[in-house]
Amino acid sequence: MSSQSQPRQRKQTEAMPSKIKANSTSSSKAVYSPLDQETNAQIKTQLQDMSNPTRFLITVCMGVVFGFALNRGRVFEPAVIMDQFLFTRWIMMKMFLSAAATSTLCISLMKELTPRQYAMVRDKPMSNLLGCVVGGALLGAGMAIGGMCPGMVLAQIGAGVPNCFISLAAILSGALIYGLIEPYIRSWTASKTIACAYVDDIFPHRHMISIGLATVLFAVVLLLELLFPWQSELTTPLQPGCTVVTCRAWPPYVAGILVGALQIPAVAFIATAIGSSSSYVCVAGQWLRYCPQETHQHFKLLATKMTSVWQVVYVMSAVFGSALAVQLTGTMNAFDVTHQSFDGIKGGTVAQCIVGGLLIIFGSRFAKGCTSGHGISGMGKLSIG
């Protein structure tokens, strides 16, 4: 290699971070070269390495807060989830919309504070319109039948909801089955795949759009609260004389804001947005570590997700967050999973847990996202599809 080419390459390498930053902060549609994408992927892999003690601790704290918020918002209760799909209880909708509104504001903030990580969060994955529609329908059906979603199952485990481990087993089994048949699904839907787009690619005013969206979402939450006060919709009334720490429930919009705010540490320290469903595929794909590389090429979904260890740490920590919330109420031993009721909460039947678990993981993987990933984070990133 000539002496003249070495300084030139060194200058190009040094200029890369500023180039990534310029792409991420530009008001026009960002265009990433293969070199940018490769560099971003390498940095993102480093940021998601859970062998770093500080990053591991941050991820654990995020998961604990996530599980605690799901518990305090009461959206882990199967009845609350099922009733939302019947439009007879609005706790879940209030929490979801509050989380989505906070999410979009926080991600906009991170665009200014951590532009490089923001650019990585806003990468350009391929989207499948058929997958979004069919996957969303399957996910919704699974939630209505089983009274759970990928993230809420962990909160149910922490709270000792009956049959929650059956739900977990069904989701993990479904993740493995889907990973094995995904190559055939991919070949069937390949012609319907398009590049993912964002609203601010079309209307280049990210902050104004985020503020407008958050305002509308919070306005809907306010309207729902006026029509259906949250305390009147609780399955079990609050304990008399309880405090903020010991009350079994908080206003769902407060819990939702707490979940949406998790985007700040997620973007800043892990260069990603919050999500849950990939963690199950990560666990289900660990057997590929002992297989030759040719096998990895065939089962691309399992091979890609088997390194998403950060999300496994995150959702597992949610179990302890939910357990902590229960312990503070003093109503039961959160680890007594043989207990048949918790504050009157009943789990789904065995059939509901199995069918619901399979549907929600098939739906979330077909759509490439779950309630957290597609809903809260997708709306936060202003994603279209």
Image: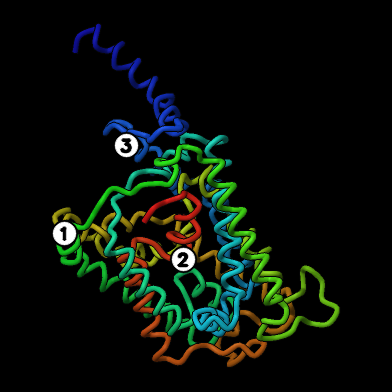
Q: Residue at x 71, y 76 (%)?
A: 229
Q: Which of the two labelled residues, at mark 1 and mark 3, occupies the earlier sequence position?
A: 3
> In which quadrant is the N terminus drawn?
top left
- The percent coordinates of residue 360 (x first, y second) are 38, 74
Q: Position of residue 300 (x, y in %)?
A: 22, 57
Q: Nearer the viewer, residue 332 or 98?
A: 98
Amino acid at circle 3 = Gln
Q: Find residue 256 and report its horizontal and vertical position in percent.
A: 62, 63
Rendering quarter of residue 89: bottom right
Of residues 12 and 225, the one nearer the viewer is 225
Q: Secondary structure at mark 3?
A: helix
- Direction from residue 131 to residue 81 in the image, left or right: right
- Residue labelled with disc 2: 371
Check disc 3 and report the residue beneath it: 37
Q: Residues within 10 Å of mark 3 (few under 14, many from 20)?
A: some
Q: Which residue is mark 1?
A: 298
Q: Is residue 321 left or right of residue 123?
A: right
Q: Which tag is nearer the camera, tag 1 or tag 2?
A: 2
Q: Is residue 165 left or right of residue 33?
A: right
Q: Are marks 3 and 2 in contact (CB under 8 Å)?
A: no
